[in-house]
């Protein structure tokens, strides 16, 4: 199980490297647009319908196409990172529970033959209880706004999302918003699993946001979080 956890961590690190490479390519393409004094939405023809003479159309169209493709790649890689981190978390819980079960068995001078089945069952029960607990948690915050091209937007967070868990922070956390701020600061350039309720649905959505500076706006998230 330790080997499985190590392999999953290696996969997560490799995926994070891919994510960083994609983000670097996006920034490069955005710089190419900025060099032409255009963004993603400006018209490329003049008022008479002719191609604009003040920009390099090849550079602009290529950069825009690359940004669209890369942002789709980024969303896909963030989903893979989320799935891998959940798997790492599950393996860690199972391993911890296995060690505790084995320790108890040793203390009780029981045979080790039943250790594996007992620990696996305990780990499964613990994970199930955690999932059930998540379902009972109330949203403690709400996304009031999301800045364009921000880490929050890249993660898929939307205005109106109600936050049930932001990493280790949830409605049961003391000093909620100071704790949330500290948690975000401690996870700069590291993934955080955010669980939200969206619209009228009662289904939890799991997203992965990576706080970072230098994305072009204020803060490291690019979203405004208010009490639920």
Image: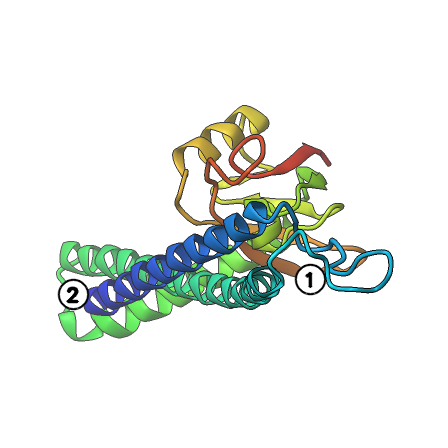
Residue 125 percent location from the top left of the image: 43, 64
Please state if 124 lies on the left or on the right of 130 as rendered: left
Which quarter shows the N terminus?
Answer: bottom left
Q: Earlier in the sequence, mark 2 or mark 1?
A: 2
Say which quarter of the image contains residue 206: bottom right
Mark 2 vs 1: CB contact within 8 A: no
Look at the picture and state if 138 lies above or below 135: above
Which quarter shows the C terminus?
Answer: top right
Q: Which residue is mark 2?
A: 110
Would you call the spot at circle 1 few (<14 residues within 10 Å), some (14-19), or many (20 or more)? few
Please state if 175 lies on the left or on the right of 188 as rendered: right
Q: Relative to the observer, which residue lies in front, 182 or 133? A: 182
Residue 151 percent location from the top left of the image: 54, 46
In the picture, the disc for residue 156 is none
Say what secondary structure mark 1 lies in: loop
Please state if 207 lies on the left or on the right of 126 as rendered: right
Residue 172 percent location from the top left of the image: 57, 36
Look at the picture and state if 21 lies above or below 145: below
Chosen colour scheme: rainbow
Determine the residue positioned at 26% across, 63% down.
10
Q: Relative to the observer, which residue lies in front, 34 or 96? A: 34
Determine the residue positioned at 51% across, 67% down.
73
Residue 121 percent location from the top left of the image: 36, 70
Q: CA distance from mark 2 to mark 1?
A: 43 Å
Would you call the spot at circle 2 few (<14 residues within 10 Å), some (14-19), or many (20 or more)? few
Q: Which residue is mark 1?
A: 203
Q: Relative to the observer, which residue lies in front, 170 or 25? A: 25
């Amino acid at each position: 199980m330790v080997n499985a956890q190590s392999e999953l961590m290696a996969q997560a690190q490799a995926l994070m490297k891919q994510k960083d490479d994609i983000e670097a390519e996006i920034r490069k393409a955005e710089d190419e647009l900025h060099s032409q004094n255009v963004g993603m939405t400006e018209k490329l023809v003049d008022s008479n319908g002719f191609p604009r003479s003040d920009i390099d159309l090849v550079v602009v169209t290529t950069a825009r196409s690359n940004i669209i493709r890369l942002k789709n790649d980024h969303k896909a890689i963030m989903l893979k990172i989320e799935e891998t981190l959940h798997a790492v978390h599950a393996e860690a819980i199972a391993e911890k529970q296995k060690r505790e079960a084995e320790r108890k068995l040793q203390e009780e001078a029981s045979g080790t033959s039943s250790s594996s089945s007992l620990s696996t069952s305990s780990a499964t029960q613990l994970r199930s209880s955690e999932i059930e607990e998540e379902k009972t948690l109330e949203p403690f915050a709400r996304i009031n706004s999301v800045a364009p091209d921000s880490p929050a937007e890249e993660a898929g967070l939307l205005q109106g999302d109600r936050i049930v868990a932001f990493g280790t922070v949830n409605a049961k956390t003391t000093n909620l918003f100071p704790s949330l701020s500290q948690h975000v600061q401690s996870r700069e350039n590291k993934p955080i699993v955010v669980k939200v309720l969206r619209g009228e649905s009662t289904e939890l959505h799991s997203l992965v946001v990576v706080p970072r500076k230098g994305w072009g706006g204020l803060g490291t998230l690019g979203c405004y979080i208010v009490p639920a």
